[in-house]
Amino acid sequence: MVAPDTGARAPLSEHLPRTTGMDRILIRGGNRLSGTIPISGAKNAALPLMAAALLTEKTLRLTNLPYLADITSMANLLIQFGVEVSIDGDNNGENGRAIDMTAAQILDTTAPYDLVRKMRASVLVLGPLVARFGNAEVSLPGGCAIGTRPIDLHLGGLETLGAEIELEGGYVRVTAPKGLTGARVEFPKVSVGATENLMMAACLAKGETELVNAAREPEIVDLANCLTAMGAKIGGVGTDTLTIQGVDELGAAEHRILPDRIETGTYAVAAAITGGDVELRNTDYALIAALAEKMEEGGISVTATEGGVKVACPNGRVDGVDVKTEPYPGFPTDLQAQYMALMTMARGASMITETIFENRFMHVPELVRMGANINVHDSSAMVRGVKRLTGAPVMATDLRASVSLVLAGLAAEGETIVNRVYHLDRGYERLEQKLAACGVDIERLKT
Ligand code: EPZ
């Protein structure tokens, strides 16, 4: 879509959620959740899948697209490069939206700081741009609230495929004038983003690439399935060793984005923390197996149903159960804050250890303000269950910390006001509507 006057590419923002400034969410706690919640397409699958559109001049169509601010950011970044983007579907529907992306006329391969700093997943355009066009310039994302978030594994892997890396002025410039050449890339540590970037780049490299110690998240399997539909040749999908045979070009495809396992887990906790009984639809028990096992150990009933997962809390309170976050299929770091909220009112204590990010306990002081009993020692938090939480005005600093405060507010006595709701809008589609439909007294306070 091109603005008539300047030729500058009009952003898509009118189709997708605008950033919601300083809106706040007010929750009056104490209601049990009951009913059904439709789960949306996975944010952390949609973002790399959208970047994959850069690998071909043909149209990539993604369905079950979630309605999230991060999707807006990625769509606008693609438009900035010259990708034709169109989105259709009901902005309030339960079936997600469809997005068509055609990267036929790429005019620019620079991802500017003001876009990248808002959404680190912008670095996922590096692999596709270098593989197809031989160059890319992406602002270094910088750190975020949960950690320094380096991209050395992404850059090291691209270098192994023959790219040249230059760091200058806060930007990383990656060039491969003669194209990329397949090679063996062994990741010193498991990285979701680096695995995605390298898998996409390897699709158009000359010869075979082997990715060793690759991440195995369902979102990576989903991306591999989409790339295969586009004509890529990928072996070992779902394992920690991926082999990719480079091809000359990729073609058109239509791909349905898999359900969001973090959203699924978040609402499973919402049901449990309120002693409720909820069916999560359009999702799959296998996507939250690690969380389900811990919740079942604590006495919550989590069962697979025809179209999703049923969560019930028969004996009112969960028992404390220890958790350590690990790469998939271990307990996901993205559910650590939500699980901690559940443990604040458990019978007994639980030790929660975060092994993926160096600073992912920002929800702790806010939960303590609501009456939780939590002590942090290095990368572990000891949570001693209390009888009740009390509502309070709380502030969050990242997406998952924000939602853990919402979860605590569902069960707390009195009113909880969660500030900086824009964090939530990055990762949770229609949060208030989905919770209100299950009996929660919740509203958004517009500023
Ligand atoms: C993805 O981030 C997710 N984001 C994160 O979800 C998720 O927490 C994370 O994977 C882990 O599962 C998206 O998929 C868009 P990593 P990513 O590379 O790829 C270190 C959310 O809430 N590392 O697997 O950035 C890194 O610092 C977000 O939805 C390097 O050292 O995560 C971290 O300690 C938050 N060098 C660890 O590896 C690198 O080059 C795992 O990071 C890359 C990463």
Image (cartoon, grey):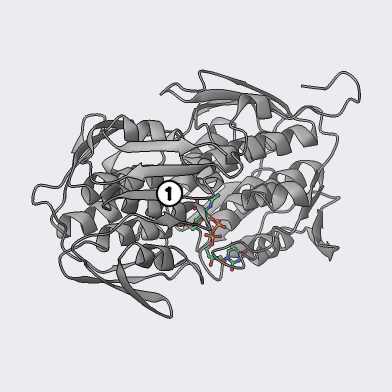
Q: Can residue 229 be seen in this view?
A: yes
Mark 1 secondary-structure assignment: strand
Q: Residue furthest right?
A: 6
Residue 300 is situated, as x and y percent measured from the top left of the image, at 16, 51
Q: In this view, does 186 lie to the left or right of 374?
A: right
Question: What residue is rendered at 52% in x and 41% in y?
Answer: 425
Quadrant where the image shows the C terminus: top right
Quadrant of the rendered image containing residue 321: bottom left
Quadrant where the image shows the N terminus: top right
Residue 44 is situated, as x and y percent measured from the top left of the image, at 51, 45
Q: Is residue 220 left or right of residue 199?
A: left
**158 or 231: which is nearer to us?**
158
Image height of 426 relative to 327, above or below: above
Question: What residue is rendered at 37% in x and 50% in y?
Answer: 416
Q: How many marks?
A: 1
Q: Residues within 10 Å of mark 1 (few under 14, many from 20)?
A: many
Q: Which residue lies furthest to the front in this view?
A: 414
Q: Is residue 390 left or right of residue 165?
A: left
Q: Is residue 156 left or right of residue 285?
A: right
Q: Which residue lies furthest to the bottom in this view?
A: 377
Residue 166 is situated, as x and y percent measured from the top left of the image, at 83, 63
Image height of 353 relative to 59, above or below: below
Question: What residue is rendered at 78% in x and 36% in y?
Answer: 80
- Label 1 beta carbon less than 8 Å to ligand 1: no
State ligand 1's quadrant. bottom right
Quadrant of the rendered image containing residue 232: top right
Q: Is residue 252 visible?
A: no
**219 or 389: which is nearer to us?**
389
Which residue, given by chain and number where applicable, does mark 1 sit on? Answer: 417
Which amino acid type is shown beneath numbered disc 1? Ile
Residue 133 is situated, as x and y percent measured from the top left of the image, at 80, 42
